[in-house]
Amino acid sequence: MSEQKTPTITIKPSEEIIKKANEVVFVNAGEMRIGLKKPNVLRQYQIVEALGAEAAKNEVFMGMVMPLLWVVSIDDDDQPYIASRRELDSLIMRLGDEGVGAVMGHLNSLAASIETDAQVKN
């Protein structure tokens, strides 16, 4: 009996898809310029570990934290990934009400445009 080989399929994303995935979008919050980029799924798991299981159980808290994972720079200074509660608190303080509002506003507009695109397709 001969062994059958399973065909291998390789999918290579287009340059456009790669560029879009690595794109940083900038929003302004007063004098502050905030760079935003969609975090990869690993970051979502890492933030749960960094903040602890009890914090992760709090849906309202995590709903407020997850958008902050998008912040990759503030005033052109790289923003390191959040690795602890202290770093999260520091980021929140640095962004302030206006910065957090700008991040949330941008993500809300993305969600609205995705919803609109879905309605157009249907």
Image: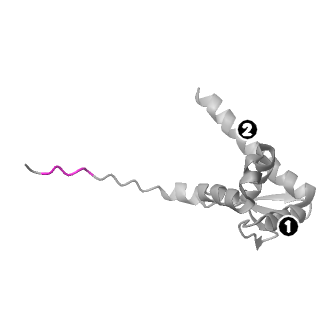
Q: Secondary structure at mark 2?
A: helix
| Furthest residue in direction front, as rendered | 54
Amino acid residing under circle 1: Ser
6 in magenta = yes
Residue sitting at x 69%, y 56%: 48
Count residues near mark 2 (Cα–Cα under 10 Å), then give few for <14, some for 14-19, many for 20+: few
Label for residue 6?
Answer: none
Residue 80: horizontal and vertical position, in percent? 72, 70
Residue that badge 1 annotates: 90
Looking at the image, do the residues carrying marks 2 and 1 touch, with CB atoms under 8 Å apart?
no
Q: Position of residue 81 (x, y in %)?
A: 71, 67
Q: Amino acid at mark 2?
A: Ala
Q: In this figure, which residue is indicated by the disc labeled 2?
A: 112
Q: Name, please, the residue furthest toward the left.
A: 1
Which quadrant is home to the C terminus?
Answer: top right
* Residue sitting nearer the eye, 70 or 119: 70
Extreme residue toward the bottom, this view: 77
Range of magenta residues: 3-7
- Looking at the image, is mark 2 or mark 1 nearer the viewer? 1
Q: Is residue 68 visible?
A: yes
